[in-house]
Amino acid sequence: MPPSRMMSLSRTLSLSRAGISRLGKTDWREERRPRSPVRRALRLAALALIFLALPRQASRSADAQVALPGGTKLQEVDFGRHVLPLISRFGCNAGACHGSFQGRGGFRLSLFGQDERADFAALVEHVDVDVPHESLLLTKASGQVEHGGGRRIAPDSWAYAVLLAWVRQGAHFSPKATRAPLKLVPSPAAIHFLATGATARLRVSARLSDSTVEDVNPFCRLESNDPGTVELGSDGQLRALQPGTTHVVVIYAGLIATVPATVRFVSASGPGETSITRQRADTGPGNAIDVLIDRRLDELGLPAQPLADDASFLRRATLDVLGRLPTVEEVRDFLQARDPQKRERTIERLLDDPQHASVWATRLCDLTGCRVETIGGPDELKPAHARMWHAWFRRRIADNVPFDRIVRGVLSGTSRGGRTPEQYIDREVALAQAALTGGVGNYDQSESLDLFYRRTSPDVTLDHPALAERVAAAFLGVRIQCARCHKHPYDRWTQGDYASFVNVFADVAFGSSTELNRAVLAHLAEDRRQREAGRSPPPLPRSQEVYLDRRLAQPLDDPATKAPAPPRAIGGPLLAAAGDPRDALVDWMLRDDNPYFTANWVNRVWAHYFGRGLVEPVDSFSATNPPTHPELLDWLAAEFRRSGFDLRHVERLILCSNAYQRSSKPINQLADAARYYACAPVRPLMAEAIVEAAEQALGERSPWPKEIRRGGTVFDVAADRPTDPRLAYLFELFGRGNRESVCDCDRSPEPTLRQTLHLMSDAEWVKRIEKSPLVTELAAAKEEKVAVERAFLRSLSRLPTPAEEQMIHEHIRAARSRRDAWNDIVWALLNTRELRTNH
Amino acid sequence: MAREVLNRRRMCRRDFLEVGAAGLLGMSIADLLAAGSSAAGKGLRPARNCIFVWLAGGPATIDIWDMKPDAANQIRGEFRPIATTAHGLGICEHLPELARVMNRCVLVRSVSHTLADHSPGTELVTTGHAPTPALAYPCVGSLATKLVKPHGGVPPYIVLGENAPAQSGFLSTSASPLRIVPADLSDRRVAAPVGLPDGFSVDDLGRRNVLRERLDRQFAAWDQTQVATELSVFESRAMDILRADKTRKALDLRSEPQAIRDRYGNGWPGQALLAARRLVEAGVGFVTASISGWDTHTDNFGRLRSELLPQLDRALASLIGDLDQRGLLDDTLVYCAGEFGRTPNVNGAAGRDHWPRAMSVLLAGGSLRRGFVHGSTDKDGYEPESGTCSPADINATLLALLGVAPQTTLRTPAGRPINVFGDGKSIGGIVRT
């Protein structure tokens, strides 16, 4: 609206400037009284318009020149560039203050200043352009008038001066600013502290839309991602508190920049330097991963552990790749082998093992949410459907199908694919028959995993928003849940982005399509005829399908436009309205310039092998959560793409790196060293792995479900909760998770008191040890030395040290019987921390 | 959560207490308690235990604790209030046993918040913080475990029930509870959670443990890693628990006289609260007992009348009466709440929907007043009218009554200082003076 029209509006309303400011004040005092929302809205609109008009009239005589902390002088105060950023910087619009949904004290701002217009409308109600210093904005913020949030801004501060100058200059706001900030330029772009206690200063400028650069330093909100490592003082002063790396996040006017900060462990000229360098030079980088890891270790001045010994390496890799302990023979063979390439050869053997596919099938079932409770269809088929889900992934990982094809099979496609309804019904009958005999039929050969969309919950057949959130977290590593109700507070996602992404799936339906219904009726009629003719056709299961039907779609509205949001990839392009937007989504995900898909996946693989992602949490890629090793993540992602999405290639690279193969022994006094891969991390075992380790050590498989294949492990269990109550109990005890939440934290492998109590005293467990083939075998062994070795190899996957051997001999001599002694020894071995962790 | 454990790796070193200068905010409950312990005769001292009775699903407190007999039909509901031993205080007619012990309780009728979904509401009420992706906060039980000196020989913190809320948030997993599920209290249990099996003596355990410790020496070099440290904490705690054998005995409800078991009731609420009392007697500092079924969107009155209220009535009244009779009430706080209240307006299915704007909670024991009502709601129960307080205020009050100073600060694994009271201010008016 041109200023002239606004002026005329203000005249028609016959409000003098004094009148307006009085209105503003009255407003405040009245605001606790109930008022009609319509009147309030009208009044607000009128006020906003009037104030938009006023600046043109207001004299510039206020000529306030504000001196900023950096020495810069600010001539004209701008609402978007100065006032709102200050409001953010002082936390006024945080969720706990006026940024909350209800506002606070009757004053509401948008969360972190995401809505300039609304914030302007709210703020102008609290200014008095006639008597600027009496504006509630100033008197409240400076604590001169009672303020629930206390004093945020001192009256003699520069910030106060900025706000005061803004009011003096007429408290105006130009929504289409010619000088809008486009990009933040922090200087320096990366900070290297040479030692703990060192300080540094960060200055931030912004490039504006008119190509000028403005110093915005005082207006930025700075946050340290790890205030224990780098602490933020006032006006951009940073202090190194302890060695490590972190990021300083700069937030200004809706822009985010991150500045990596590194604090060296050893001072650059320190005496440790040469020995560190030499130590690593001896081994040499294992592969390209190590070049990037070692570069960071050098920056940090961190020494690194040498490679782990053979037994440790074999145990670690076997647990990670196959989810079980190495067998006695595997350990012996490996220890005896003289082949200099034996680690590489072993890595190949492990990656080719069918159990490797089972481990990743389980991980993928976690990610895609394979839960018996929510699989749609007849109850009696649900456990079988879970098995088919697992088998579908298992087959593909075993065949090393390129990951892009796996993802396309999960995300796109329908139940029928190219089949006619009749062919589909025949297949459903065959699958149901297979299900009843405990099999999976040929489901694992079908092109798409339609089970991913076969979901029900008590409330809704297919919960599209929940599904979209899962896809975003699982395949893009992005959390969009917050944007379901409001703009994401720590990321850029708006409710519109959310609705657009959900609508990618809007046409997907699960149930009985008209076509299928017709075919089912025909099939039933045919069955009836068959029965009348004395034959017995196989029973027809309740047939449902995943299909596309735009007529059934209920797309979400974009709250900004109040119209259905067009399908759009999150952070990506609009997806073609013609055809299935899911296909276009997958196309976008696989593009070379996709920022999320490959990075997310290599990060998840990394996290599997190190217990921690380069981006952590793994499902939280965002501007404010940068990776610890950005170059490494980029390189791995590029390598994954270059290899044609070869999952095993990425695993091989990781497993062959020195970073993976290092000893896990902590470096003295440097507890954080594992974070930078100077030593391998010590991790709790996955629930399945600890259960499997116990089974293996004792040498006897429990009578557990049929789905554990010959030679398989409990990783073969497909359902979220197995039917065997004892196994279900153990899975829950060791934190397997129930796949209910989209979050990676659904699994909680961390130790608990109850786990320790169980391994020490559970009646059935203690009895199982005492009756185990292992104890029987050890007690019957002719040669005690051989028995001791065997006991260690079976449990800890290594040979005993001479001291340990001595200790065991003594224990046996002091015991009432050999059997008693071995009961004690096996119990003790299975209770060691060495057994319970991957190290 | 997996994510937390990884973030927590670096915890031990920084996970320390910081207690700042006191007295900035005037006399807090904790100050009063401290003053009371030195000033003879006041009888105020920090409580040692807390039993948190969690009514999962959000109880219709308008039909239980804060009835509106004079409101219109569709708000009043089907129940009438009855008089209680607390002067002038009426509660639901289906709580005759609780009516007898209300002279030992504090009813807060003015708790208010805005999160009307189960999971965020639960997080807010149990931790005092609305959920945020930035940080997972610990629930009050974990805070108490962290901040109050535990007794030996028993787990410091136990939760009873499958879904009892118990997130330990940014605290290390050693502040998380031992979870006991209904199956553990039944005779046909899958696994015994605590206690040595038949034929496995304390001597056997001790002998094996000596061997375990010697074998574990090989792993001593790993002691400074987070996981190894946590495992050590649990090993020594487990040995303590198994040697003392108090927890197993406390959980063995069969050793309780049948008359008392009958008084508590034989359903889960009775079993859980009886177990809670026995655990507190054994020295467990914090017990959360979760009772589900309160999400009464349909048939609110039928479900309250036939099952929910009679079971709660017997169990909770027996618990409070028992603690008092055994001289434990002064040392033990009882707190009964759910994630929110329910809509004053009865819906078309004779149910009530989620209503966090106004809810009542029951407190008893410790240095709390006896037979007292704090706060009130408007005539139809939509909003608090006086004494408005937040779930964080209630949590702050509990912590203060347990002797935690209001300035107490914990650090997150990232080093961020977090005041344990958060936004909460302890409600001085409900404490004895």
Image (cartoon, coloured by chain):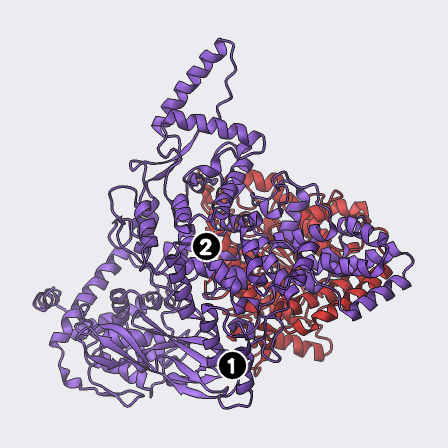
Q: Which mark is residue B45?
A: none
Q: Determine the CA span between mark 1 and mark 2.
A: 34 Å
Quarter of the image with the N terminus of chain A is bottom left
Q: Which mark is residue A243?
A: 1
Image coordinates for residue B194, horizontal then vertical, percent: 75, 55
- Name the tint of chain A in the rendering: purple
Decide if residue A431 is in sight here: yes
In the image as oriented, which residue stretches furthest toward the top? A533
- Name the tint of chain B in the rendering: red
Which three-letter amino acid code belongs to the residue tagged 1?
Pro
Image coordinates for residue A215, horizontal then vertical, percent: 27, 82
Where A117 sits versus A134, above or below? above
The residue lying toward the viewer, choosing from A285 and A132, is A285
Q: Secondary structure at mark 2?
A: helix
Instruction: Residue under label 2, please give it.
Output: A647
Q: Is residue A803 left or right of residue A390?
A: right
Chain ID of residue with mark 2? A
Mark 1 Cα shell of 10 Å, populated few (<14), some (14-19), many (≥20): many
